[in-house]
Amino acid sequence: MPKKNNFVIKGDTLLDYTGTDTDVVIPDGIRRIGEAFREKNIISVTMPDSVSIICSMAFYGCSQLRKVRFSGNLRGIYFGAFHGCSNLTELSFPEHLFAIDAMAFSNCTGLTSVAVPKSVTVIRDGAFCGCSSLRSISLPDDFFFGEDLFFSRTDPLLTLQLWDPEERPAERVLTVNYAGTKESWTRISEPIDTSFISIVHCADGDITL
């Protein structure tokens, strides 16, 4: 399999990173990032605009990761891609992002706020579960809401208990900025537990919970 400057590449997919640099710049031409950085000791990563897919577990367990520069043409972030990246404090998503898969940012305990761009139409189960420092999230007005967006059920098939129900916030701590109407929010939020949300700022007014 070809290797280029500590990157193991097959076709246009980055399969592994074998280097020791903690500040990583991914080479241009890569379209998919596989499990190349799983549990690697990296601090920052810069993606070229050729990257369109971050595959499952790509940065899983990168507990020292502090800064991510996403590709401007990124379309999807898949299952568990950034699970356990506990030193990430902020995310700047590109405007063409389409989907955030299940558990994509689960247990990113350093995240305090998230702004999801209006291009996103799918946010799947537990995408931000276990983000215990999260206090503000901005959401587009037209997207699919997965169940347990912030909290995950214990799933024996996943063998991951990402959030103990007993550790859920005792108070309503999260502010939601929602681009849609109050009626729309009421409809789409039915599948999820909103007991930890204090207020939802909608386009036509606020919903206090």
Image: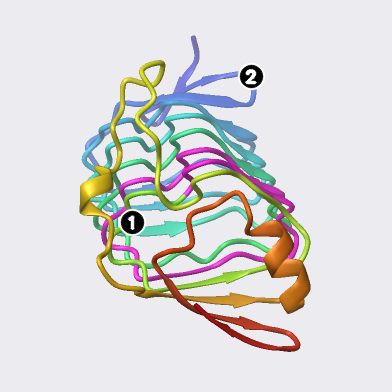
In which quadrant of the rendered view does residue 28 lie?
top right
Q: What are the residue bounds of the magenta stretch?
A: 98-127
In the rendered image, the vertical position of residue 176 relative to residue 84, given as above or below: below
The three-letter amino acid code for the residue at tag 1 is Cys
Counting residues from the start of the chain, the first of labels 1 and 2 encountered is: 2
- In magenta segment, residue 113: yes
Give me the C-alpha separation between circle 1 and circle 2: 35 Å
The three-letter amino acid code for the residue at tag 2 is Gly
The front one of 94 and 15 is 94
Q: Is residue 179 left or right of residue 195?
A: right
Name the residue that disc number 2 marks. Answer: 11
Residue at 30% x, 38% y: name it: 162
- Scheme of colours in the image: rainbow
Q: How many marks?
A: 2
Label 1 element class: loop
Residue at 37% x, 73% y: name it: 135
Residue at 29% x, 72% y: name it: 171
Q: Where is residue 73 in the image (x, y as percent from the top left)?
A: 70, 52
Q: Can residue 130 be seen in this view?
A: yes
In the rendered image, the vertical position of residue 37 relative to residue 207, given as above or below: above
Q: Categorize mark 2 by other alpha carbons within 10 Å: few (<14), some (14-19), many (20+).
A: few
Q: Is residue 43 left or right of residue 6?
A: left
Name the residue that disc number 1 marks. Answer: 131
The front one of 125 and 87 is 125
In the rendered image, the vertical position of residue 129 relative to residue 180, given as above or below: above
Label 2 element class: loop
